[in-house]
Amino acid sequence: MAARHQAPRGTRDLLPEEAERWRWAEDRARGVLERYGYGELRTPMFEEFELFARTSGESSDLVQKEMYRFTDLGERTLALRPEFTAGVMRAFLEHGLGGRGRVHRLWSMGPVFRYGRPQKGRYRQFSQINCELVGSAAPGADVEIITLFVDLYEAWGFRSLTVKLNTLGQPETRREYGDKLRALLAPHLDRLSADSRRRLEQNPLRVLDTKEEQDLAVLRELEGRLPHLLDLVGPEDRAHWDAVLAGLDAAGIRYEVDHGLVRGLDYYTRTAFEVHDASLGAQSALGGGGRYDGLIEQLGGNPTPGVGFAIGMDRALLVLEERGLALDAADTVCVVAMDATRAGASALVRELRRRFRVEADVEAKAFGAQMKAAGKSGARFLVIAGEEEWARGEVALKDSASGEQKAVKREALAGEIEARLGVRQTMTRGSKT
Ligand code: AMP
């Protein structure tokens, strides 16, 4: 019978096996963030609509077309967060963190919501890891944030990622750039999509983000004649850029300069970066970020520099799955009992569950059926509570990693498993990327 209700379009359920992969990825990420000295900030999933309108700009697609905006029963206009930065900066100002004149390193993780057309790697509810380094304008801050960005992917098994990098200069730089772009595209207006024509009026840099084939054809023809932001930036921005590149070289981060990489919002300054993965097709951006020295001032705070990024978890996990991220049952213990030992084994199972992941039969199945299920489960350890051994205070422990089976005293069992596991990790096998 068909289910009566379905998850809303663009949303998904994560069934236990998939949720386990997510938890593994989240745990890995938390480890990296902790080692970098970032603190977690949890903000509400909804905020005043006005906050997002102010940070993203009234005319942005995010505000115009993609916002889950609603009025609550108290007539407040609210919106589900479409990204983290606005809420993080709101909290930063609300709690007066900026007044303390120091650098803040913050991360957040969780669902964000955008009303878009769902397709592979594009959902209406998806998850991001968001990091911000607030209070430093130094190139070293950009280098740290980009290094952290890459290290998060590496912790998931991504190898040889290349970060695309550009500088956006200052808002004036982008205005000058926009004017040049407009002039260059003016003779081709009739060949551009309606969206691009609108963007060319409101925010010309966004035209470079187009996915429309007709626009791409025009841009391809103009290749070589399109201006580069890097050629228009002032000496201080240029010095910042050079220092960031030198810092990335020193840290061993691979990057590629992409003159077409833009972020259209007004508060962005200087560094912008992204990573892509070809396997995702048009939705290829895995994550991105940049410097936003104008944002906090725009929200009414004292001018405070900042740099940050957002990583899309759904897309990262899609890529890992396609490449065969195999999370195995490497630390699972399967306990098999007989009629005579079942009662005693239940206490043993409970004891083992204080330290290990343990599977055990609850249906009083026959010994043979339990053995068969244990074989299928892929568990590394098999503990057999046979009648004779049990009477001697022992069980049989089989370690599938070595194929070895031996009798172990019940009180020594946990220690023996622990020793064989070595440093305990929930998931041991990395991906084959
Ligand atoms: P953005 O804030 O647009 O730069 O998004 C940051 C990251 O979030 C992107 O690089 C994607 O990995 C991810 N992302 C953005 N929109 C979606 C979506 N609709 N579904 C899934 N992931 C998304």
Image (spheres, helix red, strand yellow):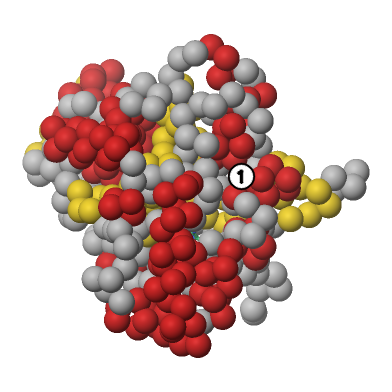
Q: In the picture, residue 141 is in which quadrant? A: top left
Q: Which residue is mark 1?
A: 55
Q: Is residue 78 toward the left or the right of residue 15 in the image? A: right
Look at 20% across and 49% down and name the residue there: 255
Look at 40% across and 24% down and name the residue there: 136
Residue 273 on image: x %, y %: 33, 49
Is residue 356 in view from this perspective?
Answer: no
Where is the C terminus found, in terms of image quarters? bottom left
Q: In the picture, residue 39 is in which quadrant? A: top left
Is residue 173 in view from this perspective?
Answer: yes
Where is the N terminus found, in terms of image quarters? bottom right
Q: Residue furthest bottom?
A: 190
Residue 94 on image: x %, y %: 67, 24
Q: Is residue 91 toward the left or the right of residue 147 in the image? A: right
Residue 281 on image: x %, y %: 34, 72
Q: Please say if 170 is above or below 343.
A: below
Disc 1 marks a residue whose amino acid type is Thr
The front one of 213 and 411 is 213
Q: Please say if 212 is above or below 339.
A: below
Q: Secondary structure at mark 1?
A: helix
